[in-house]
Amino acid sequence: MYKEVQEVKASGRTRRVHVRFFAWNPKGLLALLVVLSGLFAGCGRGAATATPSQSLDQSGAWIELAPGIRYWEKEGRVSLDIAPPLMTEESVQKFAEYAQGRMAQATLEERAFWEEQLRFVKEQHALWSDEELVVSAWRTPFWARSLFP
């Protein structure tokens, strides 16, 4: 392998040092190959988009109600996972139907919880569906750090 000779001054003495152009060891190249192959293969893509096939009775898996909204039920408790950027009008309608069904069976305290969640979903959908507002919110931090006034 071709090596370049450079002169380095250390401790008041000048020494000649041989430098390789590409100084990666085999482990570094192997790690780079693994990372790139993982990116090209799209690992994890199926896990992120898959819908659980388990019923509510089984080990409490997340169930996708609609795009951007999923829930998990176990022992009478409900956990919600809401991703507003992914919500559509259909998502809001499906969640409204689901929440109305839960409110019909709920106590007064639980009914307040479901009303609050429904209000939150509708507000978030209204915010995220306004494209100009979203773009300006994302643009502001980038313009503030840029060199342009």
Image (cartoon, rainbow, N blue to C red):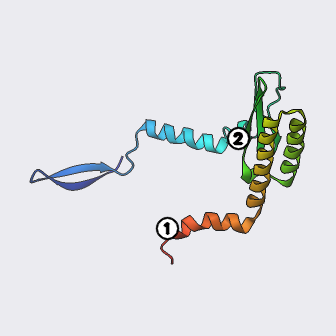
- Left or right: residue 30 versus residue 96 is left
Residue 28 vs residue 21: left or right? right
Q: Amino acid under label 1?
A: Arg
Q: Is residue 11 left or right of residue 41?
A: left
Residue 111 in which image quadrant:
top right
Let me know if residue 50 appears in the view: no
Query: At which x and y percent is residue 24?
Result: 40, 43
Q: In the shown orientation, is residue 78 left or right of residue 101?
A: left
Q: Farthest residue in the front direction?
A: 108
Q: Is residue 73 above or below residue 137?
A: above
Image coords of residue 21 (percent x, y): 36, 52
Q: Secondary structure at mark 2?
A: helix
Q: Which residue in the protein does label 2 denote?
A: 45
Looking at the image, residue 99 lies above or below residue 77:
below
The residue drawn where x is 84% and y is 44% is: 95
Q: Quadrant of residue 48?
A: top right
Q: Nearer the viewer, residue 125 or 16?
A: 125
Q: Nearer the viewer, residue 18 or 103?
A: 103
Q: Residue at x 56, y 41 (%)?
A: 35
